[in-house]
């Protein structure tokens, strides 16, 4: 039953992307609307809350160069370091709990390139259930979950396991390939 809703979500997202693959606003708004509809379907929220998020949970994937729908979660308080998603866009959609999302401007070095990278915070936002945040390619961000539990769905344009991405050290002011 739930799988039917997953397949429909993937189908609708794919159609939306095919319509206008480079439109940031479209995926931000339509993607958010489609995921909202998905989590409101009967049984879906309970199913998402029951999945074991200690392992990678791929709800749907269209090969390494296509759309991915992943579920992530935090059972204990945690804070991630700044990173980008390389050339892929991403949409973070909060299902339960809160994600504190920090975005950064890179003051030294080149976007998408390893090396010197002095970061300046450009924004801090609390993502609450039903809300989403869209990141274009190379946008630097970090997540924090100070009040677990929390679960969120992350859509990306490609499989990040196969993408060239950067991790940033605020202390060393540098970017390294992930
Ligand atoms: Fe990320």
Image: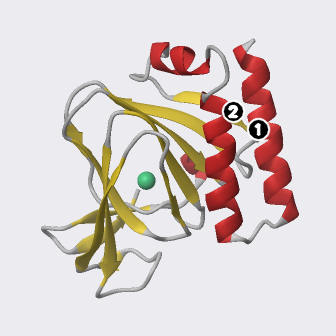
Which residue is tagged 1? 10
Q: Quadrant of the C terminus?
A: bottom left
| 117 with respect to 1 (left or right) | left
Residue 65 higher or lower than 166, as above or below = above
Binning the other alpha carbons within 10 Å of mark 2 as few (below 14), some (14 to 19) or many (20 upward) gives some
Residue 72 falls in image quadrant: top left
Q: Nearer the viewer, mark 1 or mark 2?
A: 1
Q: Which mark is residue 159?
A: none
Which residue is tagged 2? 60
Q: Nearer the viewer, residue 137 or 161?
A: 137
Residue 151 locus on image (x, y percent): 41, 31
Looking at the image, is mark 1 or mark 2 earlier in the sequence? Answer: 1
Q: In percent of the image, x 25 and y 77: which residue is there?
A: 119
Residue 31 locus on image (x, y percent): 66, 51
Q: Nearer the viewer, residue 102 or 125?
A: 125
Q: In percent of the image, x 56 and y 36: which residue is there?
A: 70
Callout 1 touching callout 2 (CB < 8 Å): yes
Distance, label 1 to label 2, CA atoms, is: 7 Å
Binning the other alpha carbons within 10 Å of mark 1 as few (below 14), some (14 to 19) or many (20 upward) gives many
Residue 54 locus on image (x, y percent): 38, 22
Q: Nearer the viewer, residue 77 or 82?
A: 77
Determine the residue located farthest toward the left in the rendered image. 171
Residue 108 higher or lower than 75, as above or below = below
State whether residue 90 appears in this view: yes
Secondary structure found at label 2: strand
Q: In percent of the image, x 65 and y 69: which residue is there?
A: 24
Residue 41 higher or lower than 24, as above or below = above
Q: Nearer the viewer, residue 36 or 75?
A: 36
Secondary structure found at label 1: helix
Q: In percent of the image, x 79 and y 57: which residue is there?
A: 17
Q: Quadrant of the N terminus?
A: top right
């Amino acid at each position: 039953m739930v799988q039917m809703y997953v397949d429909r979500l993937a189908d609708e997202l794919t159609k939306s992307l095919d319509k206008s693959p480079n439109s940031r606003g479209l995926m931000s708004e339509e993607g958010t609307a489609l995921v909202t509809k998905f989590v409101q379907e009967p049984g879906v929220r309970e199913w998402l809350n029951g999945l074991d998020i200690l392992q990678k949970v791929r709800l749907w994937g269209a090969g390494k160069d296509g759309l991915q729908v992943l579920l992530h979660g935090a059972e204990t308080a945690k804070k991630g370091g700044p990173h980008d998603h390389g050339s892929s866009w991403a949409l973070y959609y909060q299902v339960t709990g809160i994600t504190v999302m920090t975005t950064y401007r890179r003051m030294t070095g080149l976007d998408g390139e390893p090396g010197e990278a002095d970061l300046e915070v450009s924004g801090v936002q609390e993502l609450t259930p039903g809300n989403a945040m869209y990141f274009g390619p190379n946008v630097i961000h970090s997540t924090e979950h100070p009040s677990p539990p929390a679960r969120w769905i992350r859509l990306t344009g490609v499989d990040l396991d196969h993408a060239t991405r950067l991790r940033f050290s605020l202390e060393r002011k540098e970017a390294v390939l992930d």
